[in-house]
Image: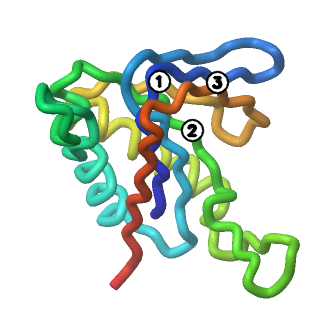
Amino acid sequence: MKVIVQRVKSASVTVNHQVVSTIQNGYLLLIGMKHDDGIEEIEYVARKVAKLRIFDDEDGKINRSIHDIDGEILSISQFTVYGDTSGSNRPSFTEAMEYQKAQEFYHEFNRLLKEEYQIPVKTGVFGEHMEVSLVNDGPVTIIIERTKD
């Protein structure tokens, strides 16, 4: 599982010309799942996202978590984070998880963030063409990845 975490001042997602979710101050997550990911990878990455400390403290050091700033998450499913261009210029997505299983795991990942870690989570629409807008704060972008051992 791979999640691209962007620290944002605001973010929104539009589907079919309708804004479906917006957040202020928090994370925009771009989430991809690999074909062999399991619940262990989802739990690990959810824990890392929840405990990640990438907001400035009173001394201007990156040391505060999303809880510390009462932040929100905008979670976007994005299988293209597993696009492989090593063989050609056209990405191959063979490493990405199949649609139905990825949808289940995406919902479980978001449930963990909401229920286990008490973080407000808004989402895009799984499998739809989405337009994502953000004001990246910093910019700060972190990649969290966990693969089978």
Label 1 vs 3, first from the N-terminus: 3
Report the residue that reaches farthest toward the front.
59
Q: Secondary structure at mark 2?
A: strand
Residue 17 placement: quadrant:
top right
- The residue under the point 67% across, 55% down is 99
Q: What coloring was used for the rendering?
A: rainbow
Q: Secondary structure at mark 3?
A: strand
- Tags 1 and 2 touching, CB below 8 Å: no
The amino acid pointed to by label 3 is Val
The Cα–Cα distance between marks 1 and 3, rounded to whole angstroms, is 10 Å
The amino acid pointed to by label 2 is Ile
Label 3 vs 2, first from the N-terminus: 3
Picture coordinates of residue 76 (x, y %)?
A: 57, 38
Residue 32 as seen in the image, left or right of residue 1: right
Q: Secondary structure at mark 1?
A: strand
- Tags 3 and 2 touching, CB below 8 Å: yes
30 or 103: nearer the viewer: 30
Mark 2 Cα within 10 Å, few/some/many (few <14, many 20+)?
Answer: many
The Cα–Cα distance between marks 3 and 2, rounded to whole angstroms, is 8 Å
Quarter of the figure with the C terminus: bottom left
Q: Which mark is residue 76?
A: 2
Picture coordinates of residue 112 (x, y %)?
A: 30, 40
66 or 135: nearer the viewer: 135
- The residue under the point 36% across, 57% down is 42
Q: Which residue is mark 1?
A: 122
- The residue under the point 30% across, 37% down is 113
The amino acid pointed to by label 1 is Lys
Residue 27 as seen in the image, left or right of residue 117: right
Label 1 vs 2, first from the N-terminus: 2
- The residue under the point 30% across, 22% down is 71
- Please tell me whether mark 1 or mark 3 is closer to you in this view: 3
Q: Which residue is mark 3?
A: 13
